[in-house]
Amino acid sequence: MIDFQKRVAYIRLDKFDLGNFNVDYGAKIVASVGTRSSLLRNAKDFDFLDKNPQKVWELRYHNPNTTSFIFTLAKKRIFGGDIPIGEVELKLSNFETNTVVKCDCKLRNPSNRRLNSTVTLSIHVCEDGSAPFNAPDANIVSSSYLVRKSFM
């Protein structure tokens, strides 16, 4: 029997490319991982010049077949809310358990389809209680993108 306390997915932002998204020098980027309702409290910001931020999120789950997570990237603003760069939603069932999978993802921005931002994520779907990213490498089982009409 699997201990549900050990079922956790670790998501690490390895690198990002804002593509043709226009940013000012010194701008901060905000990355979030989680469900739609938990994105704000899971936000981590970093300088846009830091192309390899190595930010890590922890996502607890019960059933990998019904669990997905959303990764969002936005330009931080002090007033008026952050400016969305893009998002991608990934299903946990398309990643092998107890392995680390590196995934290159194109971010979607429905309000501006010409943006071509990408991120490289490392995903460790862990059910054996091992340390984050302390598992053998593997490949994506199948296409893990979900079609999503809504945006932030």
Image: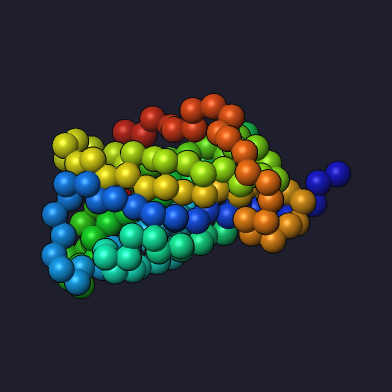
Depth check: give the residue in front, 123 or 40: 123
Outermost residue toward the right in this view? 1
The x and y percentages for residue 56 are 51, 61
Look at the image and name its color scheme. Answer: rainbow
The x and y percentages for residue 16 are 34, 52
Depth check: give the residue in front, 105 or 74: 105
Vertical order, 97 against 94 (above or below): below
> With 29 as the anchor, is 145 left or right in this view?
right
Q: Is residue 64 visible?
A: no
Question: Which residue does the image show at 49% across and 32% down from the upper left?
Answer: 144
In the picture, the quarter occupied by the N terminus is: top right
Quarter occupied by residue 29: bottom left
Please state the total of marks drawn on the protein image.
Answer: 0
Question: Which residue does the image show at 19% across and 72% down from the upper left?
Answer: 26
Question: Which residue does the image show at 20% across and 68% down from the upper left?
Answer: 27
Question: Which residue does the image show at 13% across and 65% down from the upper left?
Answer: 24
Vertical order, 94 against 17 (above or below): above
Outermost residue toward the top in this view? 142
The x and y percentages for residue 89 are 43, 40
Vertical order, 112 against 79 (above or below): above
The x and y percentages for residue 141 are 59, 29
Quarter occupied by residue 132: bottom right
Q: Is residue 26 visible?
A: yes
Vertical order, 83 against 63 (above or below): below
> With 148 as the anchor, is 8 left or right in this view?
right
